[in-house]
Amino acid sequence: MKSTSELTDFYYKTLYPDLKRLEEERKRVKSKLTTAFVMIALFSVIIMAALANWADTFHEGLLFVGFVAVAIGTFIYKNTVRDYQTDFKHKIIGPLIAAIDAHLSYRADGMVTQMRFERAGLFRRSIDRYSGNDHVIGQIDGVALEFSDLHAEYQTRDSKGNTHWHTIFQGLFIVAEFNKHFHGTTYVLPDSAEKSFGTLIGQWLQSTTGSHGELIKMDDPEFEKHFVVYASDQIEARYILSPSMMQRLSTIRARSKAELYISFVSEQIYLGISTNRDLFEPSVFKSLLRLEQATEYISYLRLAIGIVEELKLNQKLWSKQ
Amino acid sequence: MTALIIVGVLVLILVLMYNSLVGKKNQVENIFAGIDTQLKKRYDLIPNLVSSVQQYMQHERGILEKVTELRAQAMNPRLSDEKKMALDHEISGMLGSIMVAVENYPELKANENVMHLQQTLHEVEEQIAAARRAYNQSVTDYNNAIEMIPTNFMAQWMRYTRKPVFEISETERKGVDVKALFER
């Protein structure tokens, strides 16, 4: 796979004509949006001032005006940004993926299906709203791989009847074929209990709250510090999580700077990187030419596509070849 | 009344301690049975391996005979756990040296049957390594319970004694990397 610096070169050299054009487009979009937002703000203030005369409904009125302003603002934002966004993904993200590996196919509006996400079994809450984008699918070195941005949410209603949306998972979700045979399920989750309550109480909490199966203590202290493992079979969990696999997962965790949710179900590895935001989107209020921006696109793409190499998923067992 | 409650709670604690100790002991036995299954898989492969390499490996005749003999010993169903563990350790080492020796025979390296055997052995080896690690963890849990207050008193009364763990050397932790052997 190409190195980060090679890809950064590709971003600034090969993609430069498109980047420059998109940067111009971005400035236009930005000024349009700024004008629109100022107008909305002005109108809101005027209407609120007018409402001040009806003192008894003033608070409800304020809330209503605020709500409408936000709704109109979002609508305008989405509409203004849409073409720019599509263009960006088509001209920048697509070629960037092709430069990393030409065998992958990319669909900006596709996503990992909800069925696959649920099959991973990482999150037990039922999903009320499911969305995603930037779907990449293909084979790397003979290993089937797909990933996309995902956002899964659930809904609650408070006593006043207002609905609230809560995130179950938001981030990059990767599915790849695993290189070993196994029959049960193994889950590797962020270790929140041990971190906040210490080893003794934390482990006790982990063993009592597991809905994912039996708590498995692993023999890698670094891994054990960041993750908690639940599995249906003690031996199988260790067969999957070999000492080198644990090290590699710790490395990925450190590199992604986000919590990892990993499961091994029906010969697949599912890996959720909980970034809590939508990746691979063009910036609107900051320049596209910033190095930070380029590095972010490149590093997440390399991380997702590099999973096959990093976890050595291409070293298949004899019986899997 | 209060005395009754205190006695009740005490009995409950004792029952819980007793059950947790029995649970830990059974867990160790359970996982040892898991290792046993994997070891048997490996023992089944040995005669096959020996018969396919022996006509070429004249210099290693000694190792081949020894490994066959050890296998016969290990298949004895009345073996104690400690003895089994010791035999397994010895057999692992010997299989490792056979694998390395195969490198000196181009005919063997090219032989599909031998290659297949090596790969299968490698898979079993990884499963054995996983089972050993599981066993060691369950033994550690059991040994901790036996030595820590308050379960140690109960364990003493139940005549539970410490169990040994498998020694896992650094090379073994990595497993026999057959692929790397071929690529050398």
Image: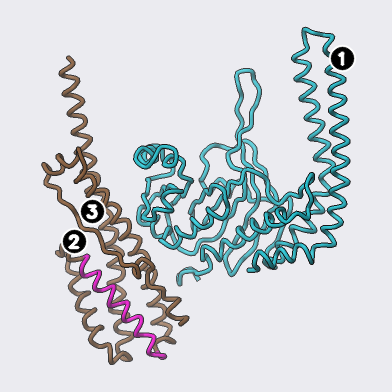
Q: Three-letter amino acid code at disc 2? A: Asp
Residue A120 on image: x %, y %: 53, 49
Task: State which chain disc 1 sits on.
Answer: A
Residue B126 on image: x %, y %: 37, 66
Q: CA distance from mark 2 to mark 1?
A: 88 Å
Residue B81's disc number: 2
Task: State which chain disc 3 sits on.
Answer: B
Q: Earlier in the sequence, mark 3 or mark 2?
A: 3
Q: Three-letter amino acid code at disc 1? A: Ala
**Chain drawn in brown:** B
Question: A314 or A126, which is in the foreground?
Answer: A314
Residue A14 on image: x %, y %: 79, 66
Residue that carries the numbered disc 3 in the rendered image: B29
Task: State which chain disc 2 sits on.
Answer: B
Q: Secondary structure at mark 2?
A: helix
Q: Are marks 2 and 1 in contact (CB under 8 Å)?
A: no
- Residue for point 79% across, 57% down: A90
Query: Could you say which quadrant of the image residue B124 lies in?
Result: bottom left
Q: Is residue A286 magenta?
A: no
Q: Is residue B114 left or right of residue A307?
A: left
Q: Three-letter amino acid code at disc 3? A: Glu
Residues shaded magenta: B85-107
Q: Secondary structure at mark 1?
A: helix
- Residue for point 36% across, 85% down: B102
- Residue for point 51% across, 61% down: A178
Q: Is residue B89 magenta?
A: yes
Residue that carries the numbered disc 1 in the rendered image: A50
Name the quadrant of the N terminus of chain A.
bottom right
